[in-house]
């Protein structure tokens, strides 16, 4: 019985993980998904000013952490990081696979904790198939 449950859990994990090497089930390619993803990201601005904020007495949550129904949370990413990723995508669009491989490799090395690291690794895997 335990083996059967473990098999179902393993099967569920396998089916739940996205397949980056193959196209998605809705027919979009990896490159189309990456373009859409970076369009929704907001570059984090580097400000040198001091700001102050007021709050509600007794409030335990930050304003950014409050969930509003129907509101999608925008991912914030460093502007340099986003520019490097966009540059790598542009190289793919231009047909420069060698340059794109180098750009994605540099991106991973310079931004190991990036939210786009998984996408960069998937892009590298896709580009390795292209000689």
Image (spheres, helix red, strand yellow):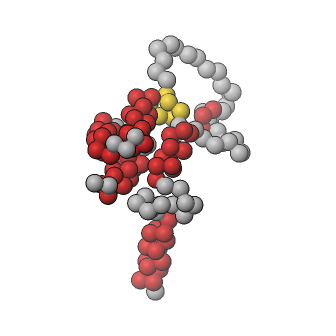
Give me the residue at 46% from left, 86% from top.
1
Q: Position of residue 21 (x, y in %)?
A: 40, 60
Give me the residue at 46% from left, 53% from top.
30
- In the image, taking residue 81 as reference, residue 131 lies left or right, namely left
Give me the residue at 45% from left, 83% from top.
4
Q: Quadrant of residue 85?
A: top left
Does any portion of residue 94 appear in the rendered image? yes
Q: Quadrant of the C terminus?
A: bottom left
Q: Position of residue 45 (x, y in %)?
A: 49, 23
Comparing 122 with 51, the one in front is: 122
93 to 46, vertically: above or below: below
24 to 34, vertically: above or below: below
Q: Position of residue 39 (x, y in %)?
A: 54, 38
Q: Residue furthest front?
A: 95
Q: Quadrant of residue 129?
A: bottom left
Does any portion of residue 81 appear in the rendered image? no
Give me the residue at 50% from left, 40% from top.
38
Comparing 61 with 9, the one in front is: 9
């Amino acid at each position: 019985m335990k083996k059967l449950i473990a098999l179902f859990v393993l099967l569920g994990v396998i089916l739940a993980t996205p397949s980056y090497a193959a196209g998605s089930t809705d027919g979009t390619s990896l490159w189309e998904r990456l373009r859409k993803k970076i369009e929704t990201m907001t570059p984090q601005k580097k400000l040198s000013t001091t700001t102050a904020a007021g709050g509600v007495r007794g409030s335990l949550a930050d304003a950014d952490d409050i969930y509003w129904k129907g509101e999608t949370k925008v991912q914030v990413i460093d502007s340099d990081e986003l520019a490097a990723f966009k540059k790598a995508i542009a190289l793919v669009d231009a047909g420069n696979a060698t340059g794109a491989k180098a750009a994605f490799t540099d991106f991973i090395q310079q931004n190991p904790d990036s939210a786009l690291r998984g996408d960069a690794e998937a892009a590298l895997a896709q580009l390795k198939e292209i000689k």
